Image (cartoon, rainbow, N blue to C red):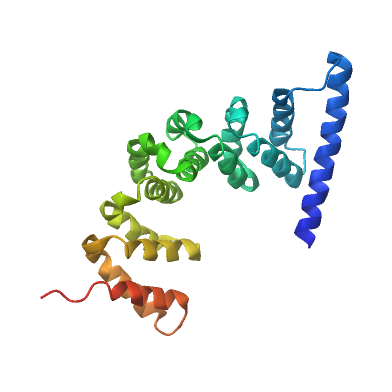
Amino acid sequence: MIRIGIALLASAALLAAAGVMMDRLTRANGSEPSRSQLIQHWSAIVEDPLQESSIRQEAMLRIRNQGIAAAEVLPVLIRSFRVTELRDDAVLAIAAQGEQAVDTLRQTLYSSDYDIRMGAARSLGKIGPIAKDAIDDLEILLADPKYVVRRDALRAILAIAPERMPGYVPHLVELMQHETIFYRRWEAVMLLGETGEAGRKALPVLRELAHRWADHPSGFDRLIQSVLKKYPPLG
């Protein structure tokens, strides 16, 4: 209920700000502001560090709802990857632009800022199979010095081209060993179970996980056991 209340307040505040802006533009131009002017207004709110996070997030949502029409503020959305509380919203807003954003995101993967690289990888993963031209660029990030960038590049590749999964077993192993967010470690184990015979390379790590979770019966423990059963002893 508290979150809903905050969201409603943010929406109301943004609507009030938009109303003031519309009145000013109407007086200046003699007509209501265009969609482009509204998008520029919302992007200015997104970039304003003095605004409450909830209001900036609400502005991001409104940009996202414009889809391809918001391509003009793509640089603003990319810069928002640096702001932790805006990053996920920026990813979704960019993904809403679809294929049109792919070329810019491919270039962004080579940014010197790892937050930007990470956000670009996440966005490409959300765009999905139509971002297939970015796979070679994402594969370069599998050697990135930052674990979070390697992780999100891998997840993006698997979202874009799941048929390539068997070739990424070593990277799934890294996720199983080092991922600190539980559901992502779960995801890595689940994906491993879909790699076929290539997944045998990961059995030592999977057995180690099974040993650690043996005294903690849970859905994760059952998942590990179900994947292990896919690899009976050879011969």
Residue 223 horizontal/vertical position (percent): 40, 73
> Is 216 situated above or below 171?
below
Front-most of residues 121 and 101: 101
- Residue 180 visible at all: no
Horizontal placement of 28 versus 94: left or right?
Answer: right
Q: How many marks?
A: 0
The residue sitting at 60% across, 39% down in the picture is 93
The quarter in which the N terminus is drawn is: bottom right
Front-most of residues 137 and 164: 164
Residue 225 horizontal/vertical position (percent): 35, 77
* The furthest residue to the front: 31
Q: Quadrant of residue 195?
A: bottom left
Residue 117 horizontal/vertical position (percent): 47, 39
Front-most of residues 128 and 118: 128
* The furthest residue to the bottom: 215
Horizontal placement of 153 versus 119: left or right?
Answer: left
Q: Quadrant of residue 196?
A: bottom left
The residue sitting at 50% across, 41% down in the picture is 123
The residue sitting at 30% across, 50% down in the picture is 163
- Residue 117 visible at all: yes
Residue 235 horizontal/vertical position (percent): 10, 76
* The furthest residue to the left: 235
> Is 202 situated above or below 104?
below
